[in-house]
Each structure stands twice: as C-alpha cells, then as structure tokens.
Amino acid sequence: MIHSSSMEVDLTQLTIEDPFFRQYQQLIRDIVIPYQWEALNDRIPEAEASHAIENFRIAAGQVQGKFYGMVFQDSDVAKWIEAVAYSLCEKHDEALLKIAEEVIELIAAAQCEDGYLNTYFTVKCPKERWTNLAECHELYCAGHMIEAGVAFFQATGKRRLLDVVCRLADHIHRLFGPKEDQLHGYPGHPEIELALIRLYEVTENRCYMNLANYFIEQRGTLPHFYDLEYKKRDEKFHSNAHGPAWMIKNKAYSQAHVPLSEQQRAVGHAVRFVYLLTGTAHLARLNKDEAKRQTCLRLWENMVQKQLFITGAIGSQSWGESFSSDYDLPSDTAYAESCASVGLIMFARRMLEMECDSHYADIMERALYNTVLGGMALDGKHFFYVNPLEVHPKTLPFNHMYDHVKPTRQRWFGCACCPPNIARLISAIGYYIYTLKPDALYIHLYIGNTVEIPIGKQKLILRIQGNYPWSGRIKMTVLSSTPIFHTLALRVPDWCDSTQLHLNHKLSNGAINKGYLHISHKWQKGDCLTLNLSMPIRKVYANSLVRQLARKVALQRGPLIYCLEEMDNGVELHNLTLPQTSKMNVIKGQGLFEHQILIEAEGYRYTQNNPEQSALYHYDHLPTAKHPQKLTFIPWFSWANRDIGETRIWINEE
Amino acid sequence: MIHSSSMEVDLTQLTIEDPFFRQYQQLIRDIVIPYQWEALNDRIPEAEASHAIENFRIAAGQVQGKFYGMVFQDSDVAKWIEAVAYSLCEKHDEALLKIAEEVIELIAAAQCEDGYLNTYFTVKCPKERWTNLAECHELYCAGHMIEAGVAFFQATGKRRLLDVVCRLADHIHRLFGPKEDQLHGYPGHPEIELALIRLYEVTENRCYMNLANYFIEQRGTLPHFYDLEYKKRDEKFHSNAHGPAWMIKNKAYSQAHVPLSEQQRAVGHAVRFVYLLTGTAHLARLNKDEAKRQTCLRLWENMVQKQLFITGAIGSQSWGESFSSDYDLPSDTAYAESCASVGLIMFARRMLEMECDSHYADIMERALYNTVLGGMALDGKHFFYVNPLEVHPKTLPFNHMYDHVKPTRQRWFGCACCPPNIARLISAIGYYIYTLKPDALYIHLYIGNTVEIPIGKQKLILRIQGNYPWSGRIKMTVLSSTPIFHTLALRVPDWCDSTQLHLNHKLSNGAINKGYLHISHKWQKGDCLTLNLSMPIRKVYANSLVRQLARKVALQRGPLIYCLEEMDNGVELHNLTLPQTSKMNVIKGQGLFEHQILIEAEGYRYTQNNPEQSALYHYDHLPTAKHPQKLTFIPWFSWANRDIGETRIWINEE
C-alpha cells in the first residue's frame, strides 16, 4: 500500500504502548475526537459555533442555509477525519468508522461535478472560485482534504475519500500550471504542497508531485500573482485587522515576497512557513532537488538557530502570528502557536528523511514534549493556541500587547486550527518515531510501541519499552521469529551526554554517526537492547545575542523544559532567583502531577515589606530581604492545569 | 493683570539666565518656533503636510479649499501662539509679534458670528457641530485656543485673541449645561477644563470656572452622553485603528467610564488623564472643593506610585497611548509620550498650588529633565513622540509591537502634538519654578533666573544662579532695594540627602517642612543665600512589584537619569552588568556632550565568541567570558543624538 519512496511506518502495524503517550492517545480517542465531532456539529452550547458540518450539508444540497464560519472552515472537518484515520489505526472502532464514512459521503456529495470542493465558495460565492488565492484558503482547504483522504485510505484501505480528493487534485492540476490558459497562482497559505506529495506517495501519480513543485517554484515570482489577481478582482479585497488588502501588500507574511530559493531567513506567518518547508523538503528528497535541499537547510538553520523558543515554539510576535528578527525571543509576548510547533515537527520529519541527523529529531522532540503537549490540557478538553513562556495574569487584561495571551486553556476556538492539529499529530505519532531507510531503521523518539517493519522481503517486529520522558532507560526487544540482519540507529539526544548500551545484557558499543548510535546485528526473537540515557537536571542558557534572556537560566530534564508556577512558589516569580551553586533534586509529583517528575531547587526570594505602600523607586538599595526558598519546578507542558496564576520558565540566576 | 487667586509669577517679569535652560529657550525661540511656523504653513518639503494655517484661511473665506489634517489640527496653531506668547515674555521680538498678530487676525476672521471657532467643522461639515464630542476634539481645540488667548494677553497685554476666545467660551457656555435645552456633554479629550480656569483667572468671570466644573462633574455620569450622542447621529462613528465606535465603547480610554469622583486608578489615554486632572486640581483649590482634592490626591498617588517610569514618563502601552496595570513598566514597549509628561508637569504644578509638598516638585523635575528634555534633540529640530527606556534598533522593523518606537527623533509629525507642547512648556518654564503663596515664596526648580515678585504692596527681586542640573550649588541673591520680610521655601530634592545652607556666607539653618527648607528673613539688597545640594551618583532600584526591573539598576545624578548607549559601550548592552561594588566617577563630557557630566563605572561584559555561529541554547553553562569593561553613562535626555544605536537605562546588577 505504501510506495517505495516512503520512509514511514505503516501505522496500522504500530501500537503505542507508552505509559505516557498512551494516555494522550486515549484522550484524543475518548475525549478530543468525540468532543470535536460535537463541536463541528454545533452541539456544544458554551463553545463558539463551528457550522463546519452544516456547511457541507448546505453545499451537498441536503439542507438550505447560509455558509457560516471562516473561509477555511472546511479544513476543520478534514483535520478531524485525518485524526480519526490515525486513531482507527491505533484501535478499531466500528461506530467511529461509521460516523467518518458518513461524513465522507457528505463530503463526496458536496463535491462539484468538475471535482471542485470547497463549501465557502460553493455556497456563498460560486462565481468567485480561484479569484483570491492570496487570502481565501481554497488551496489550503484542498490540501487538508487531500491529507484526510490519504490518511483514511492508509488507515482503512477504503478509497472513497481518496477518490474524491484525487478528483479534486485533478481539477486543480487542470487549472494551475505554466500554460497560458492556466492560473499561474499558488496558495496564500501553503499546505496543498505537502498534501499533494503525500497523495503522490499513495497513488504514484507524478502529476501531483509536479503540481506541488509548480506551486513551490511559482511562489514569489514576478509579475506577482497576488497583484495580478488583486487587479483582476477590481481591487476588491478582504479587509482584516491589519487593514485592507494587507496580505497583498505584505507578501513576506505568506513567504511570497521573493521566490523561496532566494529567501534567507524564516519570515512571516510561522505556520505557513513550516507547512511550505515541509512540502519543500519532502519534494527535495523525492526529486533529488539539491537547490531545494539547500533552501531547506538554510531556512531550517535560521529558524532553529536564531528564532526558536526553548520550548520548541516559533513565532515571536502576535502581529501576523509571525517570526521576528533573529534572536528576538520575548517570553511574555511570544505568539508560539501550537500549530506552528505541529508544523515544525512535520518539517523536521521530512528533514530526517533527507538526512538522519539527530539535530532534527532533537528539535522535533523539544517541540513535541513541550509546546505541542503543553497546548493540550491534562484533561484533553482545553487547548492553548498561544504558548507564552511567561504569564503574569494580573497584567493581561490591562496591557493590550497581551491580547493574544490567555492564562488558561480554552475549550474551542472560532478559528479552530490548533486542537485538531494537535489531535492529528498525537494520533499519528508513530510516523515521527521511526524513519525507515535502506541502511538502518532510525529511532528518533523513545515512545513505547510495538511495530512491524518490512526489511527487504522480511519483517522485523520490534517493541520499545520504557518510562520516557521521565526515565532515560529504554528497552528494545525483537519479537519477530525470522532472524534479520539489519542496523538499528538509536538517537542520542542533545540533552544527554552519557549513554550506556547493552545487547542481551552485555555491554555493547555502537558507532555514533550524526547523533545516532548504530548497532548492526542479526536480530532474532528475544534479542534485547537496553539503552541508558543519563537524564540529569540540566541548566539551560540562551545565546548571548538573546537580549531578553541575559543573566537568566531555565531547567530541563530529558526533553522536558521546566517552569515555576505561582501555585507552588508564591506570587511575584520575578523575585525568585536560582544561585549558580543551587542544589537540585528530582521529586515525584503527586495528585495532578502523579507519575510526573518535578524538580526542587534551593533558590532565593527577594521580599519587600508591604511593597504596595512603598515608593516606586528607591535610592542606593531596595529595602528587600533575601530569603532562601525551596523552588518547585513542574514540567512546563503541564502548566496552567490548576487555578490561574503566574508562570515563568526563565528565571534570574545569581 | 493677574487675579489674586493666581499663584503664578508674571512671566514678563522673569528672565531665564540659566546656562542649561537658556540654551533650550534659545532653541525654542530661534529654531523651534520659526520651524513650526514653516511647518504650519506647509513650507517644509520633507515634513508631513500640516495645512493648519491654510485651514484657517479657508474658514475665514480668504481662499477656497478643503480642510486637511486631523480633527484637532487647529490646536497646533493655538499651541504655537501660546509658545510665541511665552517667548515674547522672555525676549521681545517685533517681527515675531507681528506674525502672531496676523495669525490672530486670521483666527478672528475664521470665527463664526455666534462665537464658534473650529476650522474642521466650519469648513468640512458645519451641520455636524457638537454632534460627536467623544471623538471629535471640538472642545479640546477650543481649550487650546483659550490657553493661547490667555497667554498672549498675559504676555503682551493685547486683548484681541482674548476677546475672541471669550466669545468662543461664551458660546460654549450658552450651549453646555444642565438645562433641558443645553447639551449635557463634555469633551472626549479633556483640555478645555484647565483652559477655562486659566481664562477665569484672567477675566474673573466665574461662568468660565462654573463651566469647567460642569464638564468635570458631568463626565462619566449616566445616561452616558457618548451613547446618547452616538444614537442621535444614527450611530455614525469615526472608525479608527481599533475599530468602529471604539471610543464610545471604551469609555475608560477617555476617563469617562464612571464619574471622576469614583475613579480609583489612573486609566486610559495618559495625556487625557493628566489634562483632566490638571483642571480638576486647579478647580479644587479655587473652589475649596475637598471631594475633588481627594480625587486628585488618590489618582496622583496611583499614577506616580504605581505607573510612573523612572524618567517621569507615563503610559505603559502603545494601545490607546495609555496606562496599564499597576507596576507594569516595560522599558522597551513603553509609550511614554512626551505630551503626557508635559501634562504631568502641569498637573504637578496645580497640586503644588494646593499644597507645597516637595513630592510633587520631585516628580515635576523628573519629568522635565528627563522625558520632556529628552523629547527634543540637542539641535532643537527633531522630536520624540514616544520615549522608551530601552531601544534595540535592529529589532524595531521586525517586531511590530515596536511599531510606535522610533530609534531617532523625527522632524515633525502628522499628529503634531508633542513638539509644540514641549515648546510651550519650556518657554513658560518660569511658571514651574515658583509658587507664590501667602506664607512663602516656594522655589521648586533651581533654574537660573531673575524675577520680580509682588509681596504685599512691595516687590522682591530675586536672582537664582547656578549650574543646575550639573551642580547642586545654588546661589540666590536679592536685588530689590526695599527690605521685605518674607519666607523663602527651598525645595530639597528627593535625590539629595545632604544640604548646606549659607545666608550671607554664614552657615544657616532652616526648618524643613514637607520637603522645603523655610528661611524667614528681612530680605534686602545684596542678601545672598547659597544652597548646597549634595549630588552624588545614586543607584536606583524599582519596587519589587515591577517584574520587568527585578535584579536591575539604573543610575541617577541630581535629577538626571543616565543611560548606556551603543556608541560608547558597544553593541549588546544587555550583556553588560554593573557590580554592586562598582566604582563610579563623574567625568566631563566632550563634543556633543560638552558642559554635560557623564558617569564612568566599572562594569563587566559577558562575551561569547562568534555567537552567530553558536547554538541558540547551551546546557550547563554559556560559553561566555566575563571581562571588566568601563561603562560610560550619558544623561538619558541626550540619548539618540548621534547615530542610531542601542540604548538602555536599566541594566543587570550583579
């Protein structure tokens, strides 16, 4: 079923058994997917209306009504189906399958004769199809629907949605291209590129890959398509908070200011950027396109070396949900969108498929275990869209530069991109654990699972067990009966500087290459590999060019970034310091934090008596006393799961 | 000429002789006033068009044309005349007087039969007069014109403009008030209140004071006037960057959410707030209105104890140019408008007239010598509107939360409120030096000058000499020949903890009361009082509730706040630290800083080799070296007078 170009596991042959991740997958299955289904059907009274299913019903002619919602409302349904598909790989669920198939029939019924599929335009303004690519998300929605079709086919073998999206892709392929009678455009919001390449891998139809290539190469060329279509529409535009025709003027916002090959820095809307680069990296590998590979390397490098938050988040500013200048990483006003970290992980996966350098997997893990998991509440019912590294709730309602920041996770959003994006990533996490290369089976993430992997004409069945991310001890057992000679390449994370490997209880050595420990062996049933990754508490410091983080320190253990919360440490977290010589211990979490590992550290608190009665400025010295205080750090991904309070990752060191 | 209720000096009887301030007054006279005149007449090619004089010509029927500019464009002309008036007090200038009188004739010609005077409405929409007080600045412009009329009369004895503004005030007085056929409104932007009270002091017409009282007491009452007039206009509104009808919805923006008597915190647009409170404080004194005095005390206290920048600036956020929550004082995103500090000084002056507590004068001096002087370039030709305490120029174009921040002073502005406001304050600085009370002559600011002051039926002529703000040695000499028994009350600034006083070269003691050293004496010609205010370099620390300033220190000497600039200290000012034990020396400035006193301090720089080639995050320790570096601090008011570079007031202490 999987084309040979694919380096991904077959998700139907993989079972997550990880004590940590299983609970997230369960939450997705038991809470998120059903809840999202209710939301898509407008059955959650306290949530903002979605209308997404209703839009399809109207488009299909089943009911009368008006389109309601964002121009990209359809994509919520597509992302839900994609998450359902992955979830069905993990655990069969006849009832859920039935609902999904009904939705797919509804989508098929909403598709136009010529293959066109988009309820906003079909219902609201059928004559305006393809007249505003810059702003209207038509190709973006198509991309998500294609991803859903591919995923559902891979999960169930059922072609119904795949056939629908092939017709949609064929329709787009007829319309777009270099010929004179074709549209020379490309999406304002990239997504279809990465989707078309996935569609190619399933269908082997090169047209789809070529179309993706066209969209990528056409982007940002002159005369500029955004300007041309803008003029053709008599300069009608969609006005937004930034003013009229803003996306047409600010082409860097959608990475369309110059061709991608000329872009030197990660700029603009962070989600668009990583989606675009995910498709580009995938295409670069499949087409052996060295120029595109160099573009990916260059832009990846800028993003992670100069614009990445310690939590694996990107997007330094609320304006345009976008990147800023190099080394501008404000903790409190950060945008750091959940979706952007989901996209960053997708980008990292495609970079790993080009070259298994553990650096990509390190970033992937950082984004996954911090921003993505932090984007979801421990109850599975609440989500963050924006993930700042420091929150001072008392100030949020007063200083409007924090308008995008919420101190608690929200149930759902009018623009509901993040929850379903988190859901589909977590449900498909198997794709990110492994990369299947001819030379080796690369293991990036130590998430417990059992997987069956084809090697040549044989099958390797491998089980990974452990208590990650709390423990660095990982056990890998071979379950397949036929002996297979192959190489396992085990990632040594960047946060780990001491590893120990045993093969069948004997100390073993592997060669480290680009951050992976390579062990070649004739694997047979019962073979047991144990990897011990030392997991001390690490202090983290930012590059000296990050002006917001000078003299500050953060704590990390394993892949997890830690934070202080008011709940454990009192208010005014800015008055706490961590001395360089602080003794730090891990402790077991309790209650809400059961099974989690917390950190206790000897710190100080500077206290002032009745500061509200004291002057705003003091000469010579501040009348504060310095008291030792035991600081309690919790894993940042589990912040804001109690009452509203201050949170802070970076604290002053002394 | 001055009513007995006034506690102000007669500016025509005062001459600034201060080496420091004289240069500023000269700049205002020689550069700013002529330059602004050219700007008002649209004769400066590189500046944004003003059209302000042209609007009056059109309104007067002298030329044909359309109104152009802000709804408050008229106020620029008024503020210019006011500055001219003060400047004429200081130095007679026949040519300037002639120009001013011509402008006054033009204004008189633009006045309507019924006394109405506003070119925006007269030219553009005469039927819409008084239909949108919330947004349209009609009363605000009237207020500025009234101030100009009062000032021009006080400066020259010429009544022409005074008569014009009396007719305007009479017109407003007829229209506004509690009667059924009157408008029950008040200005969206306060200003007319303080102007009417000044008009009362000159004319002794209590109607004007009563009208000011009406505006103040009516503000924020229910049913809400903004809503009523909004409905009356069929909900037509002026849309702005915040969206439609924004000022009507956000009543706290203009301090109209509840009556002033119920307001507990400084909120909303900072300039509006201080203008409103200036009028309120003045009225509270004249009417012996204890409730209003309590309101002033309460709101003053919140503003200066919880929302004041160390530079005497207010307005923590760009959104609405407004206050934020208590203790929210971000250095880099601060709004800190020049006009707001001008208004703060006006407010402080009225508080001093109620009660001479040096606390008010301390704040006044802080705002004057830092934000107001810093708002103007040393060349007198460039101005800041926004005065952040930290600027990182490389980031400004990329992170849009800095959209309001400019790294260099600008020549003029489309919304040109700040330059003429600075000009009129500096020209009228004599008003802020002294408060004339029956019990004593209070001296707040040690700006060199000679002044003639009526005491009973006699006159005291006093000269203040010194080299303030560089030196704390101040000499006061009596020049009047008739001996007068009176008390001089000399402010002991909050930054000074050691004073020495000599009367006629003999050590003398005065009683300190509310921060003023009182010396009662029969003053006669040749009496010489020398005050020595010790002026060491002071380290300043912020209250522990200011989260942005934890572990940070600033330097102050005398009233001046100091800062680091890239020019003197290299880039990445955030990597510099000041040790607690640092040795600090004053040094004489050179070149651009001639006559200024700079500070040198032993500090450290943390440097990283090739940080751009280094990782964004480092475990365990940052590969930096700590080098001693001599830090050079310049007075902050003179920042950004060289090339564009980083600036920073608050630095990390260790």
Image (cartoon, coloured by chain):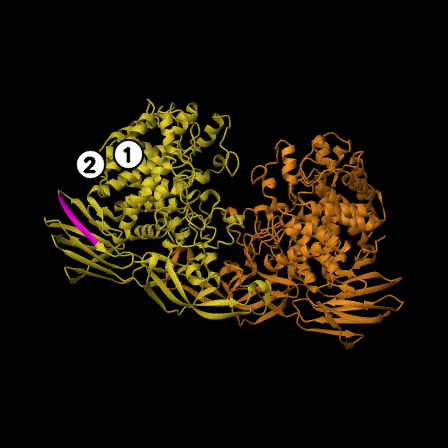
Chain colours: A yellow, B orange
Residue B477, quarter of picture: bottom right
Indicate the chain on which mark 2 is placed.
A
Looking at the rendered structure, which numbered label has been put on residue A120?
Answer: none
Position above or below: A626 against B72:
below
Depth check: give the residue in front, A327 or B172: B172
- Residue A339: % across, % down: 38, 44
Disc 1 target residue: A99
- The residue carrying pointer 2 sits among few (fewer than 14), some (14 to 19) or many (20 or more) residues within 10 Å by Cα, namely few
Q: Left or right: B261 with respect to B631? A: right
Precedes in sequence: disc 2 or disc 1: 2
Disc 2 target residue: A1
For badge 2, the amino acid type reads: Met
Depth check: give the residue in front, A651 or B505: A651
For badge 1, the amino acid type reads: Ile
Image mark count: 2
Judged from the image, the secondary structure of the residue bearing numbered disc 1 is helix
